[in-house]
Structure formats: structure tokens, C-alpha cells
Image: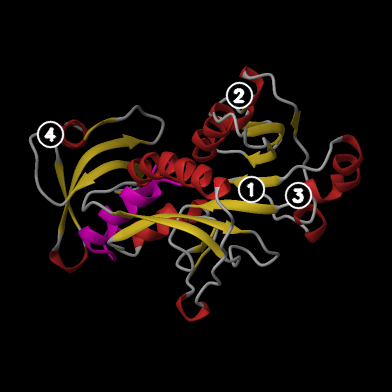
Amino acid sequence: MAKTHSVWFLGTSSFAVPALVALLNDPLFSVDLVITQPDRPAGRKQELTKSAVKVLAEKHGLKIEQPENINSTYHILHTTYSAPDYLVVISFGQILSEAILDIPKIAAVNVHASLLPRWRGASPLQHAILAGDHESGVTVQKIVKELDAGPVLAQEKLMIEPRETFTTLHDKLAPIGAELLIKTLKNSLQPIEQDTSKVTICRTLKRDDGKLDHTSLSASDIDRKVRALNPWPGVTLIINGQFLKLLETSLEPGMDTAPLSCDNETVLHLVKVQPAGGKPMMGAQWARGRQSK
């Protein structure tokens, strides 16, 4: 019988959940420790909320650590827990020091939601859509100190559909990444260095990235941003002095859409919007409300 490999799993967002499930369901792996971000305030009421990974870890009775800075807890981790075979890092949210990367006996590996070396950084799915890429995918890489610069262990491509959104692409790639991770760890690692001439970088998104002026952008530009930037930071316009959040848009008219004139004589069709302080509504409903005022 094959030897069971011990794993420390470092993850936070829902993108990491399928991989943790896959590791828990495979008898060849033992998840000895889960490290995730501390509980954070979320929602309008700013209630303290557990990460998606923590919720799953608690359900399975796993050991959990939630350091504000994992690098400052190296001594605690090193003396409290036995070193694992693998450190698996997926959508964790903290940069790891060399001391942490040196803990595993075999390797520290990461599942990244892009075809590295394209879109190194914190927002690869959003930037793939913003750039109009025709394909995306997942990469399993061996982690090095430089962000997302480690040698590639495995990749799998996925075509980006014409009306792809961040959410649809995220939900397609998360299980693909989980399956690719398991396949990779079950075979001898064969790292291939990245082609540095093809590196592109994607920065962390900020709230201001979603604040747009429809008079200076084309309808297709705004539509692409709506598909890429929802649910966060979202896309907001100011129309007649009022904030309007765009939840869904189209380049073609529909029964319940409202037209919006944009730059270069283009027209964006508002499918679903949310006025400031209001509830989500269809574009046509919002337009009728404006006319009645």
C-alpha cells in the first residue's frame, strides 16, 4: 500500500475549498493542519465571518491556525506540529517567508488560477477577462520566494467563453485545480522553469477600480469590467448625480434592459442594477423609476 503523505493546507477563499475536499477524500493524503486567515468583518453589518476554508476545516474536525502573519509564527508552528511532506497553498492571502517554505519535507506547492507566467499576482481571473484573453487555466507550481515565479509542475487550460464572468470562471477552475493538484502530488514532481519573457503581472484590485465614467469608456469596455469586477469591487457609475451599481450588462438589448449611452456613440444595455441604498432591480424598472421623478 502506498505511503500516506502528510499535508499542511494554507487557504482562505472559496477557490481553495475543492482542493481541501479532494485531499480529505483521498486516502493517500492526511491533512494534519489547516492555516487560514483570521475571521474578518463582512457584509453591511460587518459581522465577524469565518473563511470558507475554516468552515470546511471545522466541519471535519481539523486542527486550525489563524495567524495575522504566518511568518511571525514560524517558531510556534515548527515546535507544535511535525513537519509535513507537502505545504499546499491556495488563495491564502499572505506572502510566505523562506523559513516557512523550507518546512515541508518534499515541497511547498501552489495552485494558481492562470496559465503562468501569464498573470502572476492576486487577481488573475479578473485580469484575464479585462484583457479579453481567449483562454485561462490553472497552474500547479513549486513555490519560491518571488511571487508566482516558481517552476511549473502541471497546467490545464480552459477556454474563456464570450460572456464569461469572474464567478463563472472561478467556479469552473476551482474543481479543475483540485483535480490537477491531486494528480500532480501523486506523481514525481517534474518542475519546468517559467519563460520570463512572457511574464505579465496583475495587481491587487482596489475599490476605486470599479468607479467608472460611462462618458469616457465604450460600452464594450464597461461590459467587460462588469463581468470581471463583480462581486468585488463591483462597477459603479454616477448618473445625474446618483450612484448606480451595475450588476449585469449586455451589448444587446433585451425585454427588461435599459440603454445607456457611452463613449464613441456606443450603447450599453443595463440588465440588472442597484441604486445607492436600494435593492437590485432590472434595468428597465430602474429606467421607469427615473422617468417618473
Q: Horizontal placement of 270 versus 37: left or right?
A: left
Using a 10 Å C-alpha cutoff, classify the residue at mark 2 as few (fewer than 14 neighbours), some (14 to 19) or many (20 or more): few
C-alpha gap between disc 3 and disc 1:
19 Å
C-alpha gap between disc 4 and disc 3:
55 Å
Which contiguous range is marked in magenta?
213-237
On residue 198, the disc is none
For marks 2 and 4 on the same chain, the one whose residue lies earlier in the sequence: 2
Q: Is label 4 or label 1 in front?
A: 1
The residue tagged 3 is: 104
Q: Horizontal placement of 27 versus 248: left or right?
A: right
Q: Is label 3 or label 1 in front?
A: 3
Question: SS for tag 2?
Answer: helix
Residue displayed at 65% across by 59% down: 143
Decide: is 75 above or below 276.
below
The residue tagged 4 is: 256
Badge 4 amino acid: Asp
Q: x%, y% of residue 246? A: 31, 43
Badge 1 amino acid: Gly
Of 203 and 66, which appears nearest the observer? 66
Question: SS for tag 4?
Answer: loop
Badge 3 amino acid: Pro
Question: SS for tag 3?
Answer: loop
C-alpha gap between disc 2 and disc 1:
17 Å
Q: Quadrant of the C terminus?
A: top left
